Amino acid sequence: MTMQGTEAERALTEQVVSRFADTPDARLRTLMQSLVRHLHAYVREVEPTEAEWFAAIRFLTETGQMCDDVVRQEFILLSDTLGVSMLVDAINHRYASGATDTTVFGPFYIDGMPERAYGENMAFTPGTPALVQGRVMTTDGKPVANALLDVWQTADNGMYSGQDTAQPHGNLRGRYRTDAEGRYAIRTIVPVCYPIPTDGPVGRMLNATGRYPWRPAHLHFMITAADHSTLVTHLFNQNDPYLDSDAVFGVKPSLLVDYREHTADDAAAQQFGFEGGFSEARYDFVLERA
C-alpha cells in the first residue's frame, strides 16, 4: 500500500486530532477533535477532486461575503436549508416540558426594534389587516406578566424590512409586553408565504440540487420573561401550501394557527381601531421556567 493509501490517510487524521489534545477547555477539545474526525471521514468517503475542494472553499468564502452586520446572514440561511438549525433545535429541546415548541431563529432578525403598546399596529405597508392575540403562560397555567414578545414578519412582497430598503424602518417589527393577566395583542397583516433569498451561494445550491426555496407563511416570535427560558418560535398559517415542503424544515404541527375573518362591526374592530374587516388568530404561548 502506498503512502497515499487508506492507512496513511487515517494516520493523518489521527495526527491532526492529536494536535488538539492539549486544548485547555475540555468542551472545545471535544468539538475540535470530533470536527476533524468527521470532516476527514467525509473527505475520504466522497474523494473530492482538487477542483471540487477549491469550489467548496469558494462557496464558503462567498457565503461569508454575503453576510452583513444588520440584516443578511447567509451562514444561518445555509444552516437552515441543510436542516442543521432544526437539528440543533431538536437536540436542545429533546425532553417534553409542556412548553410551546421552538423552531428556527431565521436570518432576518433585527435587534432593538420599537416597543409597542398593547394592540398597536406594526404594519406600515398594505396587506390583509390582522389581529394576533392570546396569552403567555407558565407550564402550570399561570399568566406571565410583563413578558416581552419580539415579533417580526415579511411584508406582502415576501421581504423583511431592512432586507427591503423601500419599507419604512421597523415595518412589521415590534416588541410587545403582556399585561398583568399575561395577555398580548398585536395588530399587523396576515403573513404570506415567500421564497428565501436565492441571489447568493445558498440560492445557487438550491437551484443546483433541484430544491424549492419557499417558506410557508409565518410570524416570528422571540419571547423573554424573568425566570423563564427564552422561546424562539413561529406561528404558521394552517392552510399554507408549503407547510409540507418548508425550505428550512421549521414547521411543527403545534404551531399552526387559523386566521378567521371578522367584520367591521366586531367589538375587536372598535377596540383595536380597524376601519373595516380583519382576520384574527389566537395562540397561547407556554414558557418553561429557567
Image (cartoon, rainbow, N blue to C red):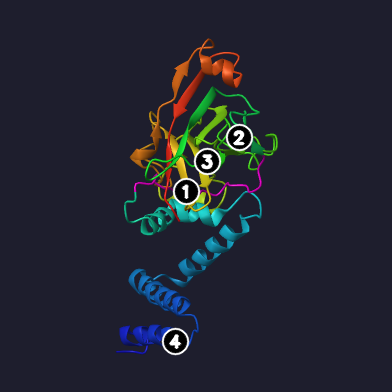
Mark 1, mark 4: which one is toward the viewer?
A: 1
Identify the residue position indicated by label 3 in the image: 145
Q: Earlier in the sequence, mark 1 or mark 2?
A: 2
Q: Residue furthest left?
A: 1
Identify the residue position indicated by label 4 in the image: 21
Which circle marks residue 126 in the picture? none
Please, what is the three-letter code of the amino acid marked with disc 4? Ala
Q: CA distance from mark 1 to mark 3?
A: 15 Å
Is 106 magenta? The answer is yes
Q: Residues within 10 Å of mark 2 (few under 14, many from 20)?
A: many
Q: Residue furthest top?
A: 265
Identify the residue at image location x=63%, y=33%.
Answer: 117
Label 2: which secondary element: loop
Residue 242 in view? no
Q: CA distance from mark 3 to mark 4?
A: 49 Å
Q: CA distance from mark 3 to mark 2?
A: 24 Å
Q: Earlier in the sequence, mark 3 or mark 4?
A: 4
**Residue 178, image x and y in percent?**
54, 37
User: Could you tell me which quadrant the N terminus lies in?
Assistant: bottom left
